[in-house]
Structure formats: C-alpha cells, structure tokens
Image (spheres, coloured by chain):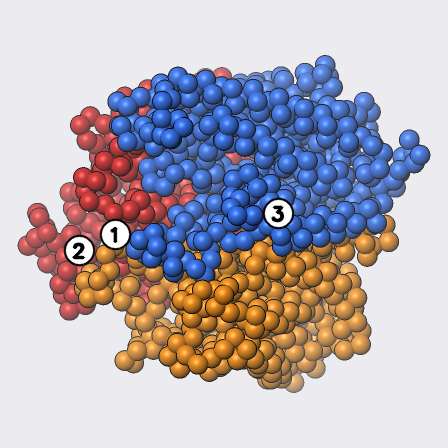
Chain colours: A blue, B orange, C red
Amino acid sequence: MAWNTNLRWRLPLICFLLEAAMVILFGVFVRYNPEADPHWEEEKRQHNISSDIENDFYYRYPSFQDVHVMIFVGFGFLMTFLQRYGFSSVGFNFLLAAFGIQWALLMQGWFHSFEDGHILISVENLINADFCVGSVCVAFGAVLGKVSPIQLLIMTLIQVTLFSVNEYILLNLLHVKDAGGSMTIHTFGAYFGLMVTWILFRPNLEQSKERQSSVYHSDLFAMIGTLFLWMYWPSFNSAVSKHGDAQHRAAINTYCSLAACVLTTVALSSALQRKGKLDMVHIQNATLAGGVAVGTAAEMMLMPYGSLIVGFICGIVSTFGFVYLTPFLESRLRIQDTCGIHNLHGMPGIIGGIVGSVTAATANVGIYGKEGFIKAFDFEGPKSDWTSQIQAGYQAAGIFVSLTMAIVGGAIVGVILKFPLWGDPADENCFEDEVYWEVPKDEESHMYRPEEPALKPVAS
Amino acid sequence: MAWNTNLRWRLPLICFLLEAAMVILFGVFVRYNPEADPHWEEEKRQHNISSDIENDFYYRYPSFQDVHVMIFVGFGFLMTFLQRYGFSSVGFNFLLAAFGIQWALLMQGWFHSFEDGHILISVENLINADFCVGSVCVAFGAVLGKVSPIQLLIMTLIQVTLFSVNEYILLNLLHVKDAGGSMTIHTFGAYFGLMVTWILFRPNLEQSKERQSSVYHSDLFAMIGTLFLWMYWPSFNSAVSKHGDAQHRAAINTYCSLAACVLTTVALSSALQRKGKLDMVHIQNATLAGGVAVGTAAEMMLMPYGSLIVGFICGIVSTFGFVYLTPFLESRLRIQDTCGIHNLHGMPGIIGGIVGSVTAATANVGIYGKEGFIKAFDFEGPKSDWTSQIQAGYQAAGIFVSLTMAIVGGAIVGVILKFPLWGDPADENCFEDEVYWEVPKDEESHMYRPEEPALKPVAS
Amino acid sequence: MAWNTNLRWRLPLICFLLEAAMVILFGVFVRYNPEADPHWEEEKRQHNISSDIENDFYYRYPSFQDVHVMIFVGFGFLMTFLQRYGFSSVGFNFLLAAFGIQWALLMQGWFHSFEDGHILISVENLINADFCVGSVCVAFGAVLGKVSPIQLLIMTLIQVTLFSVNEYILLNLLHVKDAGGSMTIHTFGAYFGLMVTWILFRPNLEQSKERQSSVYHSDLFAMIGTLFLWMYWPSFNSAVSKHGDAQHRAAINTYCSLAACVLTTVALSSALQRKGKLDMVHIQNATLAGGVAVGTAAEMMLMPYGSLIVGFICGIVSTFGFVYLTPFLESRLRIQDTCGIHNLHGMPGIIGGIVGSVTAATANVGIYGKEGFIKAFDFEGPKSDWTSQIQAGYQAAGIFVSLTMAIVGGAIVGVILKFPLWGDPADENCFEDEVYWEVPKDEESHMYRPEEPALKPVAS
C-alpha cells in the first residue's frame, strides 16, 4: 500500500464532514444562554438585575478577546520560528483551532451547560472552548512539521473529547480548582502531544535537520507569538475566575510570575552558553513558563512574592529543559519534541499543579476571611465539610488523573495517526511548507530555495 | 500635458488643507457628549445614574479598541502580501484611515449626533468613524498598487461623505438594522471600490505582473492582518449593538460563523488545486467572509447553527470567487481587483444583507419575547405598527440602496481620479513602493532588487 | 584593564541578584489591595458597594492590557527597524521591562500605596508600573545598539528609582495633573536617555554605520510596533484618569490628536524630500508625537479641536526634528540618538507639558461645571483655595522639575555605565545582534551576512 501527500480529496472531505456534523449538532443542541437571549429583559426583572452592565459579557469579554489572540496569534506565530514552516504553523493552527472551538462548545456544553436538552452558550463558553483548544495547540507543538492537516484534525477531534472528559472529572468529580488550566490544559496537552510524537517516532528525521532551525526573520515572527502570549497570560489565568477579587488577584499573580520568569530565563540562557550568548529559543519559550505554572494557584492567595518564586523557578527549570532534557528525550527516549513543549507546558504544568495543591493546603480563614474562604474553594453544599487539606489532596489527584488521561489519550491518537492514510510527509520533507502549500518562489529574496530537489512522496 | 509621481508639493498641500479644514470644522462643530463632559456628575444626578460604570465608555471601549486594531493593523497588514508594496499597504492605509476617521466624525456627527448646533461625540462616534473608514479600506483593496496617496485621500473624502449619506438613508429613513455593516460597510465599500478600479482600468498592467504576487515573508505579514481581523470580528459586529443580550449574542454568532468559514475555505482551497495544496490567498481572505456575512444578522436571533451555515456557505462562495470569478472579472469585465475584495466583501456583503432580511422576516414574539422583540427591532414610536415582514422588506431595500449608492459614488470618484493630476504610477511601476517611498536597498538580502531599471514617469 | 562582551557570568549574576532582591522585597512589602483580596466580600458590605462590577478591575483592566501591549510589543517592535538588531531590540526591551515593572511596583508602591507597612497593589499599580517602565523604554531608544543588557538593567534600576521620586514630587508635592505622562514619562525618559547617550558618546561610531539603517522587512516589523503604539495610545492616556467622563474624554482627545498628527507627518515627510518621497522613519515615529503631546491635557477640557491642533503641530515639529535636529545633535552636540527619541518624546513631551499648563490656566467653572471643576483638579482639601492659574503655574514647574531630574539622573547613569565592566560592544560591533545572541546563519536568505569579519572585543 502506498500513500502520498496529495490531499486533494481527503482534506476537503474531512473538512466538509466535520463542519456538516457541527451544523447538525449545533442545530439540535446549541441555544443562547439567557444572558445572550432576547428574553434578557425578563431575566433581568426576574432576578432583580438592575443594569445591563451586570451581563456576564461585560465581566469577561475583554479577557475572552485576549485569550482568543493567544490561541490564534500567540500559538500560531510562536511556531513560525522554523525557517520554512511558517505557512503551516500559522495556517494549520488556524484550522485546528477553528474546528476545535466548535467541537469544544459541544463537548464542554454537554458536560457543563446542558439544560432541558439544550446547551446554553455565553461568553464563558467561548473562553472555555478557546482554553480547550489551547491544549491541542500545545500538543501541536510536539508534532509540528511532521504531520498532515488531516492528522491534526483527527487529533483535535479526539483530544478535545478527552480534554472535556478529563476536565469534567477534575472540576466536577474531584472538585479541583484550576482556573488557568495548569493541569487541564498544559499538563494534559503536553503529555498528550509527547505521547503522540513518541508513537510517531521518525528514526530518519535528521534528513530534514537543515530545515529544523530558524532564520533571522522567522525568529522575529515567533517573538510576535511569544509576546502576545506573555502579555495576555494574566487574562488567560483570570478569564473564568469568579467575579471581583478572584479575577483581579489572578491577573496580578500572573503578571508577577511572568516578570520574574523573564529574568531567570535570560540568566540561564546566558550561563549555559559557552560565550554567554542568549538563545532565541529560550527567550521565545521559557519566559512563558511562569504563566503556565501559576495557572492553578493564580486565583488563590499565592501572594505576589509567591508568584515571583514560581516564576523564578520555572524560568530555570524550563531553560534547563531546553538545553539538556530535550536532546536527551530525543536521543534516548525517542521523543521528538519539535517546539520543546515538555519544557514550556509539561514540567511547568506539573509544577503548577503542585503549587496549586500546596497553596490550597495552606489556605485558612485567617488569610481569606470567612466568606472569602468559602467562596474561593466553594466550601458549601456538598463540599461544606471540606478542609484545605482535603482540597489539597484532590488537587494533587488532579495532576495524576490529567497525566493518565493524557498518556492514554495520546497513545490512542498516536496509533490512529500511524495508519498510512493521512498524507503525512516523508522524513526528508518534514518541516517544509511546500508539501501542503503553494509557496511563492522568492527567487530574488533567496529566502526560499527553489533549487531544492522536488519533494518525493514515499511508498511504504 | 505631462504628469509625474513626484508628490513633493501636491501631497503636503492636500494634507495640510484637509487637516486645516478639520481643525476649523471641529472648532465650530465638535463638542463632548455629556458622558465625556465634566458635567457628567450633574448628568448622573439628573438621570438617576447610580455609578460611573454606567458610562457608555465601559460598555463599548474594549470593542472600540478591537475595531481600531482591525482598521489599522488588520486591513493594513492584510494588504502587505504583495512583495514590494508593504510600505504603501500599511502606510497609505494608515494615512487614509487617519484622515477618514476625522471626516467621518463630522459627517456622521451631522447626521446622528447633532444637537443645538454641535456634534456631541462619545466612544460610539469613534467606533462608527472607524466603521465608516473600514469601507474605504475595503475599497482601497481593489485599487491597491495602482493609485497615489493623493488619489486615496480624494477617494476617502468622497467615499466617507457618501457612506454617511447612505448610512443615514438605511438607518434613519429605511429603519434598517445593520449593526455589523454587511450592507453599509462591506457591500457599499466593495462595489464602490470595484467601480473605481473599473474606471481606472489599466490595459497594460501585466507590465507589473511580476510584482503582483507575494514572497514567503510577505505572506506571513499578511497573516498578521488576517488573524487580527478574524479574532476581533466578534467585536466589530457587536460594537454598536444595544447593551446586554444583543451585544452578547452578536459576538457569539460572529465567533461561530467565522469558525465554520475556516473549514470550508480550507476544503475548497485544497479541492480546487491540482495537487490539493492550499493557497495562502484563500486562507488570508476567504476565512473572513463569514464575519462579513453575519454583519447584519449577528445581533438578531440567527442562532448558533444559523451562523455556522452562513460561515459554511461563505467560505465556499468566497474561495470559488478567488479561483474563478476574479480572473473572469479581470479578463472579461476589465475589473482589476487587486485584493479580491469582491470575494471577501462584495458577495459576502450581499449574502449578509439577505441573511439579515430573512432573519428579520422570521422574527416573532415567540422567539424574542414581547419586550425583546420590540427592543430588537425598535418596534415602538413611529415603527410601533411594523411587522417582521415589513422590516424584512426594508432590510432588502437596504441592499439595493447601498449597491446603487456604491456604484454611482464609485463612478464619480473613478472619473475624478482619472484626471492626470494626482501622481499615479505608470503601468510598469505599479505595486512598487519605490515610487512613493525611500526604500532601503537591501543589497545583502536581495529582498529588493536594486538593479531594477529606474522608474520612468510617463507622459500622457 | 581589558573588557569583553562575553557576559556568561556577569549577566546571569546580575539577573539572579536583582530577581532574588525582588522576591525578598515583595515578601516583606507587597500585599493585595482590598479589591484583589478575598476580604473583598466584607469590603463590599462595609463600603456599601452593590456589585462586583464596581471593582476597579473592570474599570481599568482593558486599558491595562492595551498599555501592556504598548510597552512590550509597541516599544519592542518599534526598535526592530535596524537591520541586524531585531533580537536585541525586542529581547532587551523584554528583559528591562520585565525587571522594571517589578522594581516600579515597589518604588511607586512605597510612595503611593503604602499602608501599615505594606504596599497594597491592584490593577492601577500594574498600569503605573508599566508607565514607569515606558520611560525606560524611551531612554533605551537613545542608546539602542550601543549598550549591553547589563548596562540596560543598571539603567533601569536607577531610572525607575528616579522616575518614582520625580513622579512623587510632581503628583504629590506640586499637585500636578499628568495622567498620560507627558512630563513624568516622556520628557523625563527622553532627556534622561539623551543625557546617557551624550556621556557615552562614541567618536568612532561611523564604523558601524552600515548597520545603523533598516532593510525592507525590518521596516515592516517596526510598523507593527508603531501601529500598536498608535492604536492603543488612547488607552495609555486614559488608563489612570478618574472613572467616568475623565477617562472617556482622555480617550477621545488622544484619538483626535493622533489622527491629525498622521496627516502633518506625511505632509512634512514628503515636503522635505527632494523627490517628495515618504521616509519610513517619520511614519514610524512622528505619527506618534500627537499622543505624547496630549498626555497631560487629554483628560482636561482640551476640546477635540484643541487636540487636533496639538497633533497638527507635533507632526510638523517631530518630522522637522528627524530631518534637521537629529543630525545637528549628533554632529555638533555629540548626542547620538539612535531612534530619534528627542523628536518623538523629548520635544512633544515638553509641548505636552506646556499644553497641559495652558489648558489648566483656561479652566473655569463655566466650562467644567462646579462639581466637574473641583473633581478635575482636586480643588478640595489642601487645594480648596487653588485657582486655575495656580494650577497652571505648578504644571509649568513640573516641566522644569522633570527636566532637571532627567538631566541629573541621566548624567549619573551615564557615568556609571562608562565603567569598563559592563560588556558593551566595540564601536565596530554596535547595532549587531551577534554580539549577545546566537544568530542563525541564514546562508540561503542572505538576510544576515556570514562573511562578516568576526567580532573583535576591544581592549581599553
């Protein structure tokens, strides 16, 4: 059996099928939340809401837009660092995220917003859908350059499904707090992606080695992604926190953690290079680890100095990972992690889960105030007899559940993607836009080498 | 009579004259709306407003900033796809928009915010001015690379004027709903621009053909524009909707439509290429058609699945347009549409008008609730005896009025721009920054060819 | 004594020391403002606050994020115009700003948010920290390409300290109004940076002259910075204004001023070039001068036409500065101002101070209303017997205090940076990323010349 990279019928077919399914499922299930429904006037009267400004839209829409930018520009451009894979980085990220948010609206909707046979969506659902897709963007980083858009759509379909199940277990069964998604988004997304790339291991990938690096301007494009991720991360970690102090505090903590992370990343990057020179890969990635690692605890009483400490540590851990761990994973464990997501999302995600658990364990009425304590951890109703320690235990359990789900899910996806049907590129054509894109020839600019030998489809 | 492209005295003169006129007209007419005036404290007391948060600023400012980014970064960078026209794309868009918003504040102000001899401006006026200029940016896409900045300023002056007249007819005389501007902005802007470029037809434009394409990095710059347009479009379509549910719903619908549009665009782009490869032009443009086409109906009860259907269709229509219609328009109808605005704004704009009319026709008290129905369509005062069907009829009429105004207005502007006074480039110098800009020589990078023959001014 | 540019131990050391100091000082001093503290529920009850939406977070967070983008993407990318200094422009700006905001939270906190031994931070502190760092980014523009990251961290440490002292003198002792920072940020930052670069004068800088210019794509990257600065400047000038009309008015005035500034910049840029061609340097920089120059008066009753006049003038002054003054400063006064900050921040900053003083002088109860007048200038408590004229006098005094502080502070920093310990580049290696960064070789793209002679460390 032979396969090739001409997707002319396969890609359109899967896109149409998926989108048609979305239309039907949305038609059957998706309606507006009362806050987005014209009955809002009656809703206001019934619930004694005095003003339109109390509509959740005004609490969350600015954060939503920041998160939206992170998913599409942030992740998309962060991955443009490869010299000849910019179209695919931005374009495939665009494709998978556009599909993923629709499927996430359904999956998360069934679990969290289902009433009387309908999913009622509001701006909070949009944010959560973006979050869910964020975990797919993370996993995309591991397989970047080595898979076809069809494979990405399949991965998105399954990963979003499992993300939603995992999120439901954590938030609703284990009653874990994870507003910024250290566990649900980053840990899950990273180990999911690493598992996929492990199964898709390519022993002859060094045939594409000369393209698996950056050129001067591709590194600058990637910095657009880095900076929008870095700047808007406070919105990410606070977007779905409770109104008022929690949202406010989550933004402050994330701001602090990220700032500290930049300094230790620069320090390590310089210290680990023979001539003390900085490495763009570290600046592009490790500076963000501080945002990942306060994802769980940002809305808690982590304290500004606590946030600095977390950022401090993560800048170091993440940069170390890029220098020593990524080559080790590739050479010894056969894990080819194109973007180094283990350093940016994997380890910092686990650290974030631990920080969240520890911060929860130390919570008490003295620090939070009586009302604040109950509100922060929902210690009412079924949880009214919980203590900080119980919460902390469940938080810790959340890490392991996320890891397990990620590894099992990633394995399933990896095996499915291994079928020789999905048009993935040959080893010598990885990290190359020309496989899936009409690429301008740039004879004058020499930014793209037209003398490159024609791409060969491989027979298996 | 001879003309040349040295704008040394003409461009400064027109800029100074226009800006001086703005200063004088602003001095005579423009004042602050009570919400931006220090008498706000008294205003609050008089109208029993309990909190500063009720100031319209807090309802609309985040959306305003998103729209602002769309106009300046979105449209500006979207047009940088041409290999040697990046400075002009971003720079001229900057110039025309900066002038246009001032003139739009006046024109729209006279029609909509005029009280006791003064135009009272607030954040809503800023949004509407940006919207108005958006239609000029659309038209700019049709003539991109073939006109001088002087011609663009003249076009802006007249187009903003006619836009405001058309908008007044639609919104105030026909009582049409068009919050996201499918008719007023996109249909009007697109056919206006197409008419201008039709009249400015250049039979020998193939002399510049080698520059009328992209290079690798110019396509990535263009994706910055695409993504900011795509991400912020929910803000665009909801920015001037009524407070509360309408704004909320408009954002949700636009988000859905755009997501669906990406999948069908990718599907068609791949299906229509021999080897199934994706075309950056489609990804950059057709993915946005879904936002255009829900511009009218987004705030109505289009339903999430309705939005998906609209996006689904528009991705197809728009990509088809790029592949088959644009070449046809150029070769048979002598319409040289540089950016393919007919595919992104023209057809989707008309579809948007139709969708709006149909959605209005199906509206009823059952769906909207009694209060919601009246509020959504302003069925009170002079419109208190209107039905959905009447509204739908007027909506449909709005499409034709917009088309007529666009075609007549575009013809007038086209004729004026044909005068050999405005410094437009010769056919062989189109799509070339060097005509109007000091361009760095880039000998090393070869991104710009210094060996190019000197630009020749043409004699007529 | 010899020095070299290998920062392997020096840069990590200073980063770790500074960050460790931040952790300790934050641990001792920094706590959450009641609006970001879990006691918020009690706070609401005590102060009779009816809704979470009254939390300052919702008034200011969208503006904060816009300011944040200006500091990191705006300033960072604005400086990428140099052909081989993009990594350093974005990267060092990232580093100094990440450190600076932490130190600014402390310094400004001690002066303005200190209660019972603790600094209580909220979103307003984050904005002010970003503002403070903005003045360092301005100064960075003067020394761009000629200093090491260690020197930048030292400059940041001292400049943030002096900024906070100067700000305290202006706002608390002189009771000056300066919400957008014409004096505190721009005047202070610009003359500080000019003083530093004057002391660091390099007589042989022409050895790096061929790199002190742009290439085609570096100019486009810089436009990303320009546009985000331009678009978000209304948020900058309104971010810390009083709730309600003041914030609303500041945004409107800045919008107007910036729009006018674009037209006169284009006019002058064309008029001052022999062939009437536009210069990217002017478009990238002088278009922003209008935002700087309404920094003080934007929240006052400057009136929309007043804003246009200010923008009109500043576009002219700033462009003139680039064409005539910058070369003069370099050749006669030995001030090597890489980015021309004197034209963008220096002169417009002083104009802004003057405009603020004049606008304050003409303020009266007739224009503002009785309550509005008192609220706008805090004419109550210790200032209850102040008149507009007194206010205007103090405003004017603020300009001179800022200038004095900037010149003295810049001199101190300049002298410290002159010590041959900090790893600054030799004259022939200025404006060159390779000194401090691992730079990809780009053989194919020729965007970076690998045949360049190896960088030589100099002995003094």
Secondary structure beneath dot 3 equals helix
Name the residue nearer the viewer: C85 or A145.
A145
Reading the image, the residue beneath label 3 is: A102
Numbered circles on residues, count: 3
**Residue at figure coordinates x 56%, y 48% from the top left:** A117
- Where residue A396 appears, x then y in whole percent? 49, 19
Q: Residues within 10 Å of mark 2 (few under 14, many from 20)?
A: some
Question: For the residues marked 2 and 1, what is the alpha-carbon distance in whole angstroms?
Answer: 9 Å
Three-letter amino acid code of the residue under disc 2: Lys
**Residue at figure coordinates x 61%, y 69% from the top left:** B355
Q: Relative to residue B145, is residue B1 depicted above or below?
A: below
Name the residue nearer the viewer: B259 or C171.
B259
- Where residue A231 appears, x then y in whole percent? 47, 39
N-terminal-most mark, 2 or 1 = 1
C281 sits to left or right of B411: left
- Where residue B460 appears, x then y in whole percent? 70, 82
Name the residue nearer the viewer: C373 or C204.
C373
Tell me if label 2 and label 1 are in contact, CB under 8 Å: yes
Reading the image, the residue beneath label 1 is: C242
Q: Relative to residue B334, is residue A258 depicted above or below?
A: above
Q: Residues within 10 Å of mark 1 (few under 14, many from 20)?
A: some
Q: In which quarter of the image is residue B449?
A: bottom right
Residue C375's mark? 2
Three-letter amino acid code of the residue under disc 3: Gln
Q: In which quarter of the image is residue A199?
A: top right
Q: How crowded is mark 3: few (under 14 residues within 10 Å), some or many (20 or more)?
A: many
Three-letter amino acid code of the residue under disc 1: Lys
